[in-house]
Image (cartoon, coloured by chain):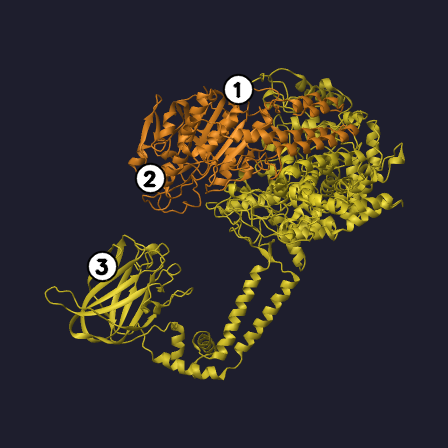
Chain colours: A yellow, B orange
Amino acid sequence: MTRHILRLTIVCLIGIALPVSGDDEIRFNRDIRPILSDKCFACHGPDDAHREGGIRFDQQESVLREADSGLHPIVPGDPDASELIARITSKEEFVQMPPADANKPLTAEEIALLTKWIETGAQWEDHWSWVPPVDPAVPDVSDSSFVKNPIDNFILRRLEQASLTPNAEADRATLIRRVTLDLTGLPPTPEEVQAFIADESPDAYERVVDRLLGSERFGEHQARYWLDAARYGDTHGLHLDNYREMWPYRDWVVSALNDNMPFDQFITEQLAGDLLPDPTPSQLIATGFNRAHVTTNEGGSIKEEVQVRNVVDRVVTFGTVFMGATFECTRCHDHKFDPFTMQDFYSMYAYFNSIDGNPMDGNRKDHAPILAVPSPEQSEHLAELNDKISQLQKDKQKDWPELDAEQAAWELALSEASDPDSAAWSVLTPQEFTSSGGASLELLEDQSILATGKNSPTDNYTVVAKTSGTEWQSVRLEGLTHESLTDAGAGRSSNSNVVLTEFEVFTAPIPENNADPKWTRVKLTGATADHEQSNGDFKVTNAIDGKKKTGWAIEGFAKKEPHTAIFTAETPFGSEEEFLVRIVLKHESVHSQHQFGRVRLSLSEESPVHTNVPAEIRTIAGISSDERNDEQKNKITAYFRDKITKSEDYIAVRDALTQTTKERDEFKATIPTTLVWKEKSTPEPAFILERGEYDQPGEELSRRTPSSLPPMDEEYPNDRLGLAMWLIDSDHPLTTRVTVNRYWQQFFGTGLVRTSEDFGSQGEPPSHPELLDWLAVRFVDMNWDVKQFMKLIVMSHAYRQSSVVSPEKLAKDRANRLLSRGPRFRLDAEVLRDQALYTSGLLVERLGGPGVKPPQPEGLWFAVGYSGSNTVRFEPDSGPEKVHRRTIYTFIKRTAPPPQMNVFDAPSRESCTVRRERTNTPMQALLLFNDPQYVETAIALAQRGMLEGGETAESIAERMLWLSLAREPEQIEVDRLVDAYKQDLETFQSEPEHARELIGLANFPIDESIALPELAAWTMCGNLLLNLDEVVTKN
Amino acid sequence: MSSSRRDFLSHAGFGLGSVALSQLLSPSSANAESGALSALHVPPKAKSVIFLFQAGGPSQMDTFDYKPELTRLHGEELPDEVRKGQRLTGMSGNQSSLPLVGSPFKFAQHGESGAWLSELFPHTARVADDLCFIKSMHTEAINHGPAVTHVQTGSQFPGRPSIGSWLSYGLGSENANLPAFVVTVTKNKSGQPLVSRLWGSGFLPSRHQGVQFRAGDEPVLYINNPSGLSTQSKRNMLDSLRELHSMQLKESADPLLETRISQYELAFRMQMSIPEATDVSSETEQTFSLYGEDSRNPGTFAANCLLARRLVERGVRFVQLYHQGWDHHGGLPGGLRRQCQETDQASAALIEDLKQRGLLDETLVIWGGEFGRTNYCQGKLSENFGRDHHPRCFSTWMAGGGIQGGISYGQTDPLCYNIEENPVHLHDFQATLLHLLGIDHEQLTYKYQGRRFRLTDVHGHVVEDILA
């Protein structure tokens, strides 16, 4: 190991300070506050609980007055009298600040800056992001030739200070590719590029911009930025990570953007669509924003804890997306850097905790509250079915005279039938009882037999008893419950159910001298029971049908009750003498261990039947028809018609109704649903949670916005709707700034505030504070018109300038924060894939619908999946209308997101993301080289080049270059590509089987006129083009 | 490398920095890439880590924490004065009775150190004198998702970088042709899920995320050329690509493009170095028999242990193995036996193999899970009992680089419920791990959302007593 042990030095990869050159004036917010915040606030800041020395460096009055020590931290104009300077320049262990163990030493530059700041009067500014933006004057610039709109004045002013000039406008091909990619996520076609180059009218560019803003591709592209922030995914994200059906919300975002819904409405509907007057389905779908967080149903989870996690995610997301606030810190303690307290956090929590639904997702795709979202066709079909049902209901309820007669006869028979309970039963006293399965049988005092011990999959009990009498008509089997049995029910199986497959009765005279009895079978012809399992064929007559496979089941998993069956003999049996009766209970069903656990047997001379008619109905039948009240009449009639009647006409109507209702319900289940918000009628109380622990509630809090921000107008309802109105109030300092900054970030790669997720004092201050404010004010002026706002950006010279970098600019403006050149950065994951599909001609464009699963390497889901999950195995879709769709429709399993996306820094959507990293890794190169879908697009691009390019290798190469680069290729590029083609062609011609293998990766038809070795060689060129820096980069 | 390429590069007068150029031209695959730490804070003891993670929560009193008293009180109720009203999971929290259950396995002492091991670890017993058994590990999480995330990232909540990512970020790579952080998951295991975020880089740049090596033809995603494509064709294509890029670079010396060129070359080299690293055909019969027959079957725990040794040999910083299936809510006696059969021999073999090759001194090997299991049974007491999750104590062993072998550290009470002596919190474990690699855990930080984050959050103390 070659490392030396030195003092800590961490290479700071982020937070590159802006060059101050050319602008010597010290600005508190830009130059001083970041130092104080980073190095001092943690112990001398907003957190009341951990403040040292009685000093707050986030408040001017605190630093100017005497501290606990009696010294003044800052004396404006006099660094020598300022204790701050004494401390930061001291080397003494107990004097030095920040203390050595804080690991936050100040640099020499920082010390110099602080000193100079105090020297020049220690000017103070409130933190820039918490004061409302004012409309700044547009600065004058010395050279207005670069000014396309006021954005350029602000940019130029800053460049002039740094002695830089912007680049000239990018060439037309570069420009149209840039703006087409930025607004629609797809590159322009060669024809569009040529038309733009040829268009000499002054508004040529503007018309391109307007065309792009009007395209439906606009919404498909813009939506994905919002979906990162809204943490939209197609699974629940935790534990089983089962499918979640929520794509209607994704489609809502796409269409809201395409419809250019004003941004204030866009956020209001998402935060509080349900609280709007008479909300439309679309407004309810929008509330999915607050449901898109990850959820769990893990066994052992504690519901209250899960609820807290869910609500915290909503509050944190709200803070990040709308306010650029790092609320998460205030979950457990007051913020160390920003003026937010735990009280603030849990008062905000109170807006988001009253959802009317279970915090656990139940592993269901439709985790309530939900909304069904039928397509127009589905609505129509549903209405048809409902009409049919109501017609059938009418038919059913009309007068049916023929039924009335039948009912009267049935009532009479019912009232005369003898009742099993009142019949005289003689309980048998078992003499012998055996179990074929080896269970231990034990005779209890009430003459019932209890089975314990061995519990074989099947078991037949044989019971022999002595009795006498000649007129026995019926045998009764009582399956009794016992506490030793499963769930104290009647059965021995794990779910307490029983299936009696056969019930057999034999008689024999008592043999003499211990001879074997001579058994005669008693023929049983009738069987009734007090209950039969309602699903499947488990009627009691199955127990006397002689078939081993069928049987009587008692539905023991649902009802832990005793059950009785009565079997009637064809003819009375018995004898005057005492005789033996042997009864065999067979449990031989495929359902393992479905044995009775405790049985008692009795004989009767009567033939009572279980009518299965509920006692209530039997009682009504006993009342003469003119004495029944209306309710009784309706009840017995309904019962008769539902269960008893044999009228074919009526049954036809009845069954049609059942069938249609079933059909309707099944159809309804195919209608997509989406997670929405539904507020409880009374708000849930909210408490401060000590250390953020769900089980440590403290003081109860009511709903309130953070106290360091302008308060909510008292006229507003104090709920999520009021919260949305508060956000879009003109004096809210954050909403507009945070939003326009994100748009800026989209187009330029970096926001004016680089830390677009943090506008607090630990975030980076804006590179162009006045421009940020100017944009924020314009956005409101234009009534939150998103398309108009984006047009403002792309019309600026700052956006349109060439991205070519000179050594001078690299030195002075390395990260292009001053915009001395146009934006240039690697395309995002979605754009890369969409571009490849589009330029090769494979892209299938269709708006909306459920997520699709283009192929991905095998085993990615399985490797992390829970065996019980319904997303444990990835099954790729097939067919171009699924696998060649735009990437926004790709199914996102959050615990194993698609590699085509996450290898290129797309987030997993497990939590809110407003800024993606942009890395450059070898894994990305491998993916672009070898991913089957990228290879497929290379084949398609090759075929397209060959079909559209003409006869010669040069013309084919030229066409492929045009399609990929969206510009006129240079001759040397054409030559290079042709060389590469020829080299590969030789290889593939000598090994045609390899060409066949490679082309085999195509899931689309190959034109018959095309020779495979040529196609394979051009495919390699296609693969090369898709990897070309100019292609994978926005220039 | 073809000579034409070398000529091309040496003649190309564009702005590739000298370092980048030398990397590009380096004939060796062993070129290191530095990390964010320009210097280490303490003398490092280990260069690499192999973490044999046993996902699901292995039962401590059936493995390494011998509790005769528990066996004596088998069947009796968990005393309230032991439980102290602490929360239980939703699974056994509603049980009316919490009967203690002693281990059904025999324990014996092994090695000069006399470490107590259950009979399930005959092979581990052989290397007991090389291991340090920590009996007093503890955590706060009681469910798998948060608990595993806690071990791997120092926080129960998703979004933080994992240990391997921190090391890749801080220390860089000893071999830039292989990822610094490699993950393997034993194939065909089921049980509690793993999540790819467990080897994610959180807010660190994504090049620090773990790269999963998989069993089968394609050890790393997209490492293989499409069928029908030879390495030569790929090389030709890359050469053409590079030429086109160089033309672009001449027009504008963009550092972004320079990086891209070098990443393409690195990708090409990885297409050789990774198959070489994963190809075990050169391993001897002796080695296979040391690791056990399973080691011939790619994707098994044994094969992954062997692979881990090959990777640290080649300079991989952190190899994270996952072996699922330790979540024995029921059927513990049979289930645990099976888990141990799958892992015991290869774990011990790894120690022996590293030692033979002189690598154990610079490689830290860790065996452990995310929490322990209860001393009472879940559900009714039966022969086929199970145990619920228990965060208050569990056992982990460490060995190799900088660890004192043949000791046991920390002590639980006689019923194996609470810790009596020398508790080691996950953050202490993490702090110790970093320390062994030369890092002060309070000084490896990354600023994100205004805060300096570190692996140990705001906690953690190095467990000095177990250091060699």
Q: Which residue is mark 1?
A: B44
> From the viewer's perspective, is residue A894 above or below residue A460?
above
Q: Position of residue A580 (x, y in %)?
A: 18, 68
Q: Which residue is mark 2?
A: B101
Residue situated in front as seen by the camera: A78 or A668:
A668
Asked whether the viewer can see residue B115, the reply is yes
Mark 3: which secondary structure? strand
Asked if marks 1 and 3 fall on the same chain, the answer is no
Residue situated in front as seen by the camera: A331 or A516:
A516
Task: Kindly identify which chain the residue marked by label 2 belongs to.
Answer: B
Mark 2: which secondary structure? loop
Q: Quadrant of residue A576?
A: bottom left
Q: Nearer the viewer, mark 2 or mark 1?
A: 1
Q: Which residue is mark 3?
A: A434
Q: Position of residue A373 (x, y in %)?
A: 62, 58
Q: Position of residue A668 (x, y in %)?
A: 57, 62
Mark 1: which secondary structure? loop
Amino acid type at circle 2 is Val
> From the viewer's perspective, is residue A528 above or below residue A863?
below
* Position of residue A148 in the picture relative to residue B214 (left or right): right
Asked whether the viewer can see residue A784, the reply is no
